[in-house]
């Protein structure tokens, strides 16, 4: 008898190859995130399907739209210097996130004084194509105090699980920054969170402002969209759902980003 080779969105060894399969993975992730943590995704239903390359004729817009939102950098550890140097005068606020407390003595707690102080996170579970998600959902927020008249972005650090923080608080993202992570928490000290996998990358795009930027070394990336993004050359565009994704030259923002790939996100 012929073996049935139906796509199984719960199988982490089998990345989705079509948009229909991506949607199955997203649906399963939503169901599990709802069942385990009560998240609702009603306002984030897809409006359009399809992916194809588009002509690179149109000009790339500027970066004015970035100032409307935040820079979000999940699983950041102590990697603060580059984002603060490059983005402090481009975005309104910067949010780094890690389950480990950063060693920055100038950060003060901005969550209520009676919230939990975390020194370690305990239990976690694996959500297919999302990765490891900790069961603790409440983050602790630390902020760098600002001086009067400070025009630069506020700097904040979320001590908590990045998936929870993203789902709860990162509703409008100007820059999604992500680098030097690994999908193997056991041997390599990576987060095991699949931020450039087919589900979380789609979630991020749904929340990014028109003209926003993905800035990454493609850590933890695989599957349908990330593979196509990695192949884009500067100036080339890719259509994904209702987004036009354009690979841009790092130096358009700063030469300091030259080791990373920058993709601008336009909404149609
Ligand atoms: C390989 S390190 C990241 C390095 C950092 N991006 C850099 O460039 O220096 C992975 C980090 O992810 C953090 N981490 C693990 N699981 C996490 C989660 N669910 N949410 C947020 N941070 C997490 C770990 O504490 C660790 O600091």
Image: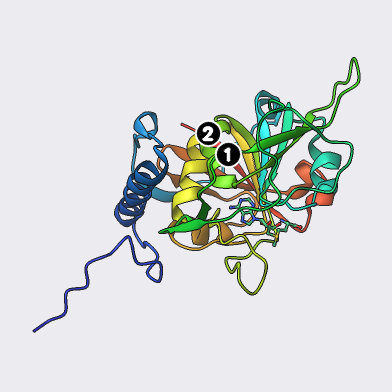
Q: At 82% from the left edge and 30% from the top edge, which residue is drawn? A: 89
Q: Nearer the viewer, residue 227 or 125?
A: 125
Q: Which of 184 and 236 is in front in this view?
A: 184
Q: How many labels does the image show?
A: 2
Secondary structure under the numbered disc 2 in the rendered image: helix
> Where is residue 87 shown, x and y percent of the image?
79, 37
Taking the image in four quarters, ligand 1 sits in the one at bottom right
- Furthest-bottom residue in view? 1
Inspect this view and state whether residue 237 appears.
Answer: yes
Q: Name the residue under label 1.
A: 165
- Are the two marked residues, 1 and 2, in contact with CB atoms closer than 8 angstroms? yes
Position of 251 compared to 131: left or right? right
Mark 1, ligand 1, within 8 Å: the answer is yes
Q: Which of 262 and 14 is in front in this view?
A: 14
Inspect this view and state whether residue 244 appears.
Answer: no
Task: Please say if 108 is above or below 32.
Answer: above
Q: At 38% from the left edge and 35% from the top edge, which residue is drawn? A: 41
Secondary structure under the numbered disc 1 in the rendered image: helix
> Where is residue 228 shown, x and y percent of the image?
50, 59
- Furthest-front residue in view? 114
Q: At 50% from the left edge and 46% from the top edge, which residue is drawn? A: 55
> Where is residue 246 shown, x and y percent of the image?
58, 45
Position of 53 compared to 157: left or right? left
Q: Residues within 10 Å of mark 2 (few under 14, many from 20)?
A: few
Q: At 65% from the left edge and 53% from the top edge, which residue is drawn? A: 234
Q: Mark 2 points at which residue?
A: 168
């Amino acid at each position: 008898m012929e073996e049935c080779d139906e796509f199984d969105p719960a199988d982490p060894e089998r990345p989705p190859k079509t948009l229909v399969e991506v949607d199955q993975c997203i649906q399963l992730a939503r169901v599990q995130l709802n069942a385990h943590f009560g998240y609702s995704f009603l306002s984030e239903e897809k409006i359009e399907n399809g992916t194809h390359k588009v002509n690179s004729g149109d000009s790339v817009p500027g970066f004015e739209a970035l100032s409307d939102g935040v820079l979000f950098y999940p699983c950041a550890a102590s990697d603060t210097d580059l984002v603060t140097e490059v983005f402090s005068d481009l975005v309104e606020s910067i949010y780094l996130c890690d389950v480990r407390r950063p060693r920055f003595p100038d950060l003060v707690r901005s969550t209520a004084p009676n919230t939990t102080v975390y020194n370690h996170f305990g239990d976690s579970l694996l959500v297919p194509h999302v990765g490891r998600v900790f069961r603790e959902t409440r983050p602790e927020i630390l902020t760098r105090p600002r001086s009067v008249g400070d025009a630069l972005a506020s700097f904040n650090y979320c001590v908590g699980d990045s998936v929870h923080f993203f789902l709860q608080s990162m509703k409008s993202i100007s820059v999604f920054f992500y680098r030097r992570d690994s999908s193997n928490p056991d041997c390599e000290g990576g987060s095991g969170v699949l931020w450039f996998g087919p589900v979380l990358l789609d979630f991020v795009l749904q929340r990014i402002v028109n003209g926003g930027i993905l800035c990454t070394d493609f850590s933890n990336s695989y599957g349908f969209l990330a593979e196509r993004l990695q192949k884009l050359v500067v100036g080339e565009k890719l259509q994904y759902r209702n987004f036009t994704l354009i690979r841009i030259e790092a130096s358009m923002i700063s030469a300091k980003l030259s080791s990373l790939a920058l993709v601008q996100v336009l909404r149609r």
